[in-house]
Amino acid sequence: MESRPLIGVTTSEVRRAERTRPLPEGEPPQHEMALGMPYVRALARAGAVPIVLPPLGIEVVEALLAPLDGICLSGGPDLDPAAYGAKPSPDLGPTEPTLDAFELEVARTADAMGLPIFGICRGAQALNVARGGTLYQHLPAVTDQSIDHRQTAPGWEETHTVHVDPASRLAGILGTDAPWVNSFHHQAVDRLGRGLYAVAWAPDGTVEGIEDHGDRLVLGVQWHAETLDRPGQPHPRLFEALVASASGQRLDLAA
């Protein structure tokens, strides 16, 4: 039986003890790590064995990543701007600095180990910050607001198109330079991190895709590809590309 690559996926958020509702006969309230099942299902369908990474101290990150073949950085809350040396905007959403520190260390360590990396929404932003880039903290302040980047429609519904550079790896994977996507983000890439290139944009100019041009897959998209898995949609190929790179192969580019 052909082995399936181990892909580590970060948790989307930490549910704080004061917001949980434990059973009366259970333990006292505790912080809980949370990750939507669509992430692990998408990875499994693509041929991976997903491994959820608990957000522990950064001193254990190297050991956590040692057995892995690739990394998926999941979505989640706003990143604390202290991570890239900026002051918080009055419109900054809730943040989890401890989760930020862990996820950024995961991205940096995976980079140093030469692991393939695929970032989704906040994960794409974390990849950019890990490479020394910065973020727009409040998109409505820097766009014409013609695009609703925090849609109220369900996650499986696409609400706007993005333009993808036809010469990019992202376009080659998707097989299109104009996919329809969903949108659930408050922040977005501002200054690009080292070795990263913007390769996809929303109609209002917001960066929607970033990639490294090296042989190893290092890719981030702003939309939630894990929920866009209906027949005929191109987004599952993003997870297939991660699995192929983690297996030391190249995904056959879409026609």
Image (spheres, rainbow, N blue to C red):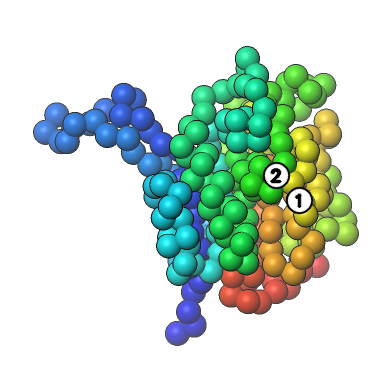
Using a 10 Å C-alpha cutoff, classify the residue at mark 2 as few (fewer than 14 neighbours), some (14 to 19) or many (20 or more): some
Name the residue at the bottom extreme.
1
Q: In this view, does 168 lie to the left or right of 106?
A: right
Q: Which amino acid does label 2 sit on?
A: Gly
> Height in image: 158 above or below 116?
above
Residue 70 at x, y = what percent? 56, 64
Residue 237 at x, y = what percent? 66, 61
Name the residue at the left extreme.
25
Residue 105 at x, y = what percent? 54, 50
Return the residue nearer the eye: 17 or 34: 17
Is residue 223 visible to us here?
no
Q: In this view, does 252 lie to the left or right of 155?
A: right
Using a 10 Å C-alpha cutoff, classify the residue at mark 1 as few (fewer than 14 neighbours), some (14 to 19) or many (20 or more): few
Residue positioned 53% across, 33% down in the render? 77
Which residue does the numbered mark 2 point to in the structure image? Answer: 132
Residue positioned 56% across, 23% down in the render? 93
Q: What element carries label 2?
A: loop
Which residue does the numbered mark 1 point to in the structure image? Answer: 194
Residue positioned 72% across, 29% down in the render? 136
Q: Is residue 5 left or right of residue 234?
A: left
Q: What residue type is labelled 1?
A: Arg
> Height in image: 140 above or below 59?
above
Quarter of the picture holding the N terminus: bottom left
Name the residue at the top extreme.
90
Residue 198 at x, y = what percent? 81, 47
Decide: marks 1, 2 in contact (CB < 8 A)?
yes
